[in-house]
Amino acid sequence: MTRVHNFNAGPAILPLDVVQETAAAVLDFNGTGMGIMEISHRSKEFDAMIKEAQADLLSIMNLSADEYAVLFLGGGASMQFLMVASNFLKTSADYIVTGVWAKKAYEEAAMLGDAKVSASSKETKFNQIPKTWNLNPDADYVHITTNNTIYGTEWKTLPETGNVPLVADMSSNFLSRPYDFGKCNLIYAGAQKNVGPSGVTIVIIKKSWMEKANEKLPTMLNYRTHIDNESLFNTPPCLPIYAFHRTMKWILKMGGLEAIQLHNEKKAAYIYDVIDKYSDFYKGHVVVKEDRSLMNISWNLPSAELEEKFVKEAKALNMVGLKGHRSVGGIRASTYNALPLESAEALANFMVEFYNNNK
Ligand SMILES: *Cc1c(COP(=O)(O)O)cnc(C)c1O
């Protein structure tokens, strides 16, 4: 089997080790004579695996299990847009709107209560992270989206929010760099960008914050249910959790988040360097360099025809997933954790060649 250069935005490339280990576990999970799709989520073998995945994640993030609970939930990151607001929006909440997903999170919350846009980069087509915001010191929480998958901007550090709890949608740069994760009361991420297949969403929640949560909620929407039942109130997505477990082992083997960040910086540099060198031809969407994402790189060519040609010729060279999101067009290369250095290098070389042939 040949693996292509996979620049898909999500579901996306996974480490080959993770894919192979998960494939093996579909046939036989840890010598049980049953596949991971066939074993009870309440068996001792599954229990040991899920607990190890939680512990590995907290150790990678440098968080303590006394303070934080790790949940594995269904419904995608989109479900968290409404769960966060259902549980914690009482008086009002602040949303920093930096792209399509951030806006969706805000819109869900606005259906449930008084959600406010405290900063937005919409006027400039989300080509940067706002540097000033209007935070209400009495807000129930502030919500940010640490990486904007479609436009390609990224928060390089988490903002200071004083006493106001910080909630972060980290779906598209989860575990791609170290952050001061302890600044957050709640972090969530759909697995399918950086930590596994679709089907599971990881939620990390500060347990003490639950004292402030709304009490009267449908069972499945209530974080308390999932904390008390250790993510086993309903049958969890067993196979995606196993792939997540293997991804945590892979991150540890790679040397943790500092090493992963270096690897991601090298890959992104290949592509941004070409964009900067041939800026008359390749127009990066993000204008503020420090806000450029290491995970999703978006740019335009001089015409839609050239963009189509670019995607087509890249495909002939085994590079897939380069078409920009349908809402913005252009080109997007997603360079998630699992993308090898060689793939970024191959794309950069192709970009130079394409420039020379089409300028
Ligand atoms: C992909 C993505 C989502 C949506 O994830 P689903 O799991 O499809 O609901 C939300 N937020 C961000 C930042 C994303 O990249």
Image (spheres, rainbow, N blue to C red):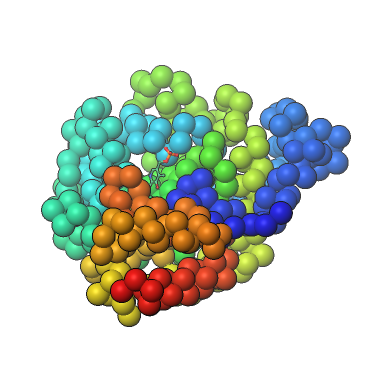
User: Residue 357's x, y, as percent?
Assistant: 38, 74
User: Residue 315's x, y, as percent?
Assistant: 50, 57
Q: Which of 204 and 124 is in front in this view?
A: 124
The residue depicted at 40 percent of the width and 32 percent of the height is 79
Left or right: 238 in relation to 165: right
Q: Can residue 221 be seen in this view?
A: yes
**Which quadrant: the N terminus?**
bottom right
Left or right: 165 in relation to 334: left
Left or right: 344 in relation to 131: right
The residue depicted at 52 percent of the width and 50 percent of the height is 12
**Which quadrant: the C terminus?**
bottom left
Q: Which of 88 and 158 is in front in this view?
A: 158
Looking at the rendered structure, the number of numbered marks drawn on it comes to: 0
Look at the picture and state if 204 lies above or below 220: below
**Ligand 1 lies in quarter:** top left
Look at the picture and state if 39 lies above or below 24: above
The residue depicted at 81 percent of the width and 39 percent of the height is 28
Q: In which quarter of the image is residue 302?
A: bottom left
Q: Nearer the viewer, residue 298 or 317?
A: 317
Q: In which quarter of the image is residue 217?
A: top left
User: Residue 112's x, y, as percent?
Assistant: 25, 27
User: Residue 303's x, y, as percent?
Assistant: 26, 60
The residue depicted at 23 percent of the width and 45 percent of the height is 95
Q: Is residue 168 visible?
A: no
Most distant residue in the bottom direction: 277
Q: In which quarter of the image is residue 199?
A: top right
Q: Nearer the viewer, residue 233 or 265?
A: 265
